[in-house]
Image (cartoon, helix red, strand yellow):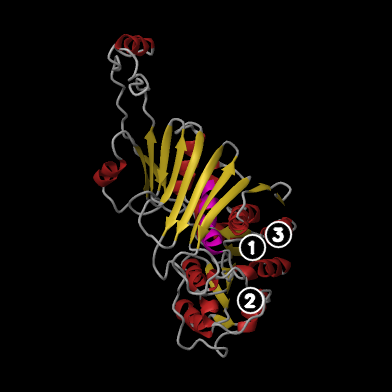
């Protein structure tokens, strides 16, 4: 934690129970000479480059080859991983390498399905960026195909699934720290060209430096457009916009904390209110997801950056706040509900004094409506949480030790499907019901 203990407790406020992350050595075992894992990277744009940088720092990971459709990305990949890294525009060249054990896929969403299918077909382990697939139907297919390859690891890249703070929140919810949950609010606001995916277009972007035909792939054909290539999240043909980019992170974390599979209905409102740059996806989206016994209010605003950020889980006996202050995602606070009910001063104000006195005393208060004894003070308590492996390290552990994926295709599918459902509700202007067991939407 970068904040001091005094700062932490001051931000928590009176009557709050604060849970703080503390450092701990990762549990990823050291790589031996026979533990070298050959990695191939498909897509080394913004996120893919970050994945290349992160994975190559893990002992035993050896980047072998990277594929991308823009020459500049391949140049940068060599700068990051070294000149020995092979580069190509054809992702099949990555899959055909016998010395590649695992592939990392970070491409536009409309390519995810085919690349995962091709990787599984040739026996590779797969780390696939979220969302798992461009549509609910494609996600269902990938879950089924992954199940037919039980010896191969498929891990979806939504880091909230394996974070220590998520695990602590899940533990506390199960222990009844806030009573029965009834509502969750999840927020992700930002307001900048970068936050709205208006990424810089390099000056050499052209049909000569970009394989446009291969980029389009299964999507509808259209003339070359460098803005579309570098800002593909802004169009429905390649992405699900804010829902599949940002809601998926929130839904993955929500499902892990609350120990649920998927929502059963959703209604959405929003629109394109600021970033009118030719995009077709909204920049403001508010969706309410219904689960069994509680609802989640989830929203993204790309036109305003003011907090609150993070997650608020409301229960009958308290409120849990994750990532609401300090370094986002590294603070968990529980605010208990009042230990004793208050006398109904408002509800009795129009009654005669004698009746008020009678009601107050019958409810266990003094004649004036005051508690007979002061409620016990709530003692602030810090609970240390060991900082475990990163999401990337968990994938390497699974590949090396053949342990189950920490975010398998099914988990990735249900989080992505919730985001797709939110988009359907937004575009149709209807509240949609979803039976995730049968896949029926109504």
Task: Say above or below: 276 vs 408.
Answer: below
Q: Which residue is mark 3?
A: 137
Viewer-proximal residue, 44 or 311?
Answer: 311
Viewer-proximal residue, 101 or 94?
Answer: 94
Q: Residue 393 in the image: x percent, y percent?
A: 51, 59
Q: Residue at x 64, y 62 (%)?
A: 133
Viewer-proximal residue, 273 or 141?
Answer: 273
10 Å neighbourhood of mark 3: few (<14), some, or many (≥20)? Answer: few
Task: Say above or below: 151 vs 68.
Answer: above
Instruction: Answer with mark 2 or mark 3, whichever residue precedes in sequence.
Output: 2
Q: Residue at x 29, y 26 (%)?
A: 377
Q: Residue 19 in the image: x percent, y percent?
A: 37, 41
Q: Which stretch appears magenta?
A: 241-254
Any part of residue 41 in sight: yes
Q: Which residue is mark 2?
A: 94
| Residue 242 counted in the magenta span | yes
Q: Residue at x 64, y 71 (%)?
A: 111
Instruction: Answer with mark 2 or mark 1, whichever residue precedes in sequence.
Output: 2
Q: Residue 285 in the image: x percent, y percent?
A: 50, 57
User: How many angstroms separate mark 1 from mark 3 (CA)?
Assistant: 8 Å
| Residue 251 counted in the magenta span | yes
User: How many angstroms separate mark 2 from mark 1 (CA)?
Assistant: 20 Å
Work out which residue is located at the far left of the displayed protein and give it. Answer: 6
Q: Which residue is mark 1?
A: 133
Q: Secondary structure at mark 1?
A: loop
10 Å neighbourhood of mark 2: few (<14), some, or many (≥20)? Answer: many
Labels 2, 1: front one: 1
Labels 2, 3: front one: 3
Q: Secondary structure at mark 2?
A: helix
10 Å neighbourhood of mark 1: few (<14), some, or many (≥20)? Answer: many
Q: Residue at x 69, y 74 (%)?
A: 218
Q: Residue 52 in the image: x percent, y percent?
A: 50, 71
């Amino acid at each position: 934690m970068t904040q001091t203990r005094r700062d932490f407790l001051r931000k928590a406020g009176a009557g709050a129970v604060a849970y703080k992350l503390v450092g701990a050595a990762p549990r990823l075992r050291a790589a031996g000479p026979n533990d070298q894992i050959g990695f191939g990277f498909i897509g080394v744009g913004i996120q893919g480059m970050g994945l290349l940088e992160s994975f190559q720092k893990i002992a035993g990971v050896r980047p072998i080859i990277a594929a991308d459709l823009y020459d500049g990305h391949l140049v940068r990949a060599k700068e990051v991983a070294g000149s020995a890294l092979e580069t190509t525009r054809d992702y099949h060249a990555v899959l055909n390498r016998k010395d590649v054990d695992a592939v990392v896929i970070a491409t536009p969403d409309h390519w995810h399905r085919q690349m995962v299918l091709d990787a599984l077909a040739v026996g590779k382990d797969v780390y696939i960026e979220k969302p798992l697939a461009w549509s609910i139907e494609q996600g269902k297919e990938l879950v089924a195909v992954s199940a037919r390859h039980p010896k191969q690891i498929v891990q979806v890249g939504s880091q909230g699934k394996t974070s220590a703070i998520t695990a602590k929140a899940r533990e506390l919810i199960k222990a009844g720290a806030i009573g029965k949950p009834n509502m969750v609010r999840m927020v992700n606001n930002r307001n900048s060209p970068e936050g709205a995916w208006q990424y810089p277009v390099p000056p050499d972007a052209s049909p000569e430096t970009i394989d446009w035909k291969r980029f389009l792939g299964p999507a509808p054909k259209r003339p070359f457009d460098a803005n579309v290539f570098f800002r593909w999240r802004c169009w429905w043909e390649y992405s699900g916009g804010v829902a599949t980019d940002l809601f998926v992170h929130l839904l993955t974390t929500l499902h892990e904390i609350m120990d649920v599979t998927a929502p059963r209905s959703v209604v959405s409102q929003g629109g394109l209110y600021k970033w009118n740059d030719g995009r077709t996806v909204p920049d403001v989206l508010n969706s309410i997801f219904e689960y069994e016994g509680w609802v989640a209010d989830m929203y993204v605003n790309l036109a305003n950056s003011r907090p609150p950020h993070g997650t608020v889980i409301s229960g009958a006996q308290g409120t849990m706040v994750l990532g609401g202050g300090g370094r986002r995602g590294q603070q968990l606070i529980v605010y208990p509900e009042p230990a004793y009910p208050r006398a109904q001063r408002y509800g009795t104000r129009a009654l005669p004094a004698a009746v008020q006195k009678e009601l107050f005393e019958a409810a266990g208060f003094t004649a004036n409506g005051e508690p007979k004894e002061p409620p016990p003070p709530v003692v602030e308590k810090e609970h240390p949480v060991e900082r475990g492996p990163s999401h990337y390290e968990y994938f390497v552990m699974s590949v090396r030790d053949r342990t189950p994926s920490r975010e398998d295709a099914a988990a990735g599918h249900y989080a992505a499907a919730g985001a797709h459902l939110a988009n359907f509700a937004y575009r149709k202007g209807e509240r949609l019901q979803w039976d995730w067991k049968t896949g029926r939407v109504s």
